[in-house]
Image (spheres, grey):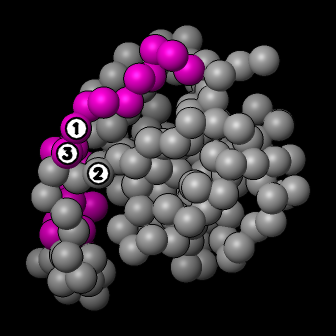
Amino acid sequence: MSKKLVAYFSASGTTASVAKNLADAAGAALYEIKPAVPYSKADLNWMDKQSRSSLEMRDKSARPALADNNAAIDAYDTIFVGFPIWWYIAPTIINSFLEAYDFSGKKVVLFATSGGSGFGKAVDSLQPSAPGATIIEGAVLNGRPNKAKLQAFADKY
């Protein structure tokens, strides 16, 4: 049985809720990926082309600083990484997280929340940030998936 970690970034709380329920259903540890500078409501205004999130998502090399590097990645075999879909990919803070640790030989299973889009090119945009890891497009977990659905999802990996 592999040791599992659910690591997540949540800008508004939606992904946090799913991540906590997934960790509970999977019997996994939980880790929040936090930016060094939290996002304000104005930062997240995707309709403002000069908002922080818009600028970061346009710049593929943007790597928002992390609040800490305390995830004990070495202790886990399977890491579920959750995030909201931004511009059809993962927010660039997920690249920051993946680049902060050695994921070699690890299975990284993505899960996301979205207002309407799928994963898009999330796997392609994240793979270079975790060389040596196997990145798997897991599922978009919108709404309030029940414990049985989350456990079934976690058990696949």
- Residue ID for mark 2: 34
Amino acid at pointer 2: Lys
Q: Earlier in the sequence, mark 1 or mark 2?
A: 2
Task: Identify the disc placed on residue 135.
Answer: none
Q: Secondary structure at mark 3?
A: loop
Is residue 53 covered in magenta? yes
Label 2 to label 3: alpha-carbon separation: 5 Å
**Which residue: 13% across, 58% down?**
37
Relative height, residue 12 to residue 135 (above, below): below
Q: Quadrant of residue 154?
A: top right
Label 1 to label 2: alpha-carbon separation: 7 Å
Give yes or no for contact between labels 1 and 2 (Cβ–Cβ under 8 Å).
yes
**Which residue: 36% across, 68% down?**
11
**Which residue: 60% across, 78% down?**
116
Q: Secondary structure at mark 2?
A: loop
- Residue ID for mark 3: 67
Label 1 to label 3: alpha-carbon separation: 4 Å
Specify the segment rendered in magenta: 52-76
**Of all residues shown, which one is farthest toward the bottom?**
47
What is the x, y in percent for residue 33?
A: 35, 47
Q: Quadrant of residue 113?
A: bottom right
